[in-house]
Amino acid sequence: MSVKVDLDKLADTLAEYALGYLITVGDDFRAHTVAVLPAFAHGAFTIGPLGDTSRRNAAAHAAVTVVWPPREPTGYSLIVDGTAEVTEDGMRLTPSRAVLHRSPDGVHDCVSLKG
């Protein structure tokens, strides 16, 4: 199941989540995933510091994703897609799409975060 999340309400939705996972891709299009604690303010995330691979990947391929797992096994994961801008301290991520997703017992009922 997917439920779209209104990007204007993303800050409220984030209050239910803690550690996220940043997903970037390299020139070989293999995913590189690292744990992050993004800060959200003024419509964008600040993520940092970044390792060399995440920094290099985001500079070459600005489309990135952050996934926050649910706190409970039957809860929703928060998935945010966006465009990364590599900065001196890490990256600034401007979200383009956000969705709450879960698939317990084969039931799909994702919630899109409209934007």
Image (cartoon, grey):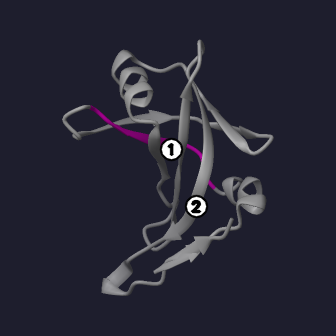
Indicate the quadrant containing the C terminus: top left, top right, bottom left or bottom right: bottom right
What residue appears at the point 76 percent right and 62 percent down from the top-left corner?
A: 9
Of 109 and 63, the residue lying toward us: 63
What residue appears at the point 22 percent right and 40 percent down from the top-left corner?
A: 30
From where the camera sits, is residue 34 visible? yes
Mark nearer the N terminus (2 vs 1): 1
Q: Which residue is mark 1?
A: 20
Apparent side of residue 89 relative to residue 32 in the rendered image (left or right):
right
For the residue marked with disc 2, what is the amino acid?
Answer: Ala
Task: Check residue 57 for magenta coloring.
Answer: no
Q: CA distance from mark 2 to mark 1?
A: 14 Å
Q: Which residues are magenta?
A: 17-26
Indicate the quadrant where residue 86 lies.
top right
What residue appears at the point 65 percent right and 68 percent down from the top-left corner?
A: 5
Indicate the quadrant where residue 98 lies.
bottom right
Disc 2 vs disc 1: Cβ atoms closer than 8 Å?
no
Badge 2: how crowded within 10 Å, few (<14), some, or many (20+)? many
Apparent side of residue 18 relative to residue 64 in the rendered image (left or right):
right
For the residue marked with disc 1, what is the amino acid?
Answer: Gly
**Residue 91's spot in the image, x, y percent?**
57, 26
Looking at the image, the residue that sits furthest to the top is 88
Q: Which residue is mark 2?
A: 98
Of 53 and 67, the residue lying toward us: 53
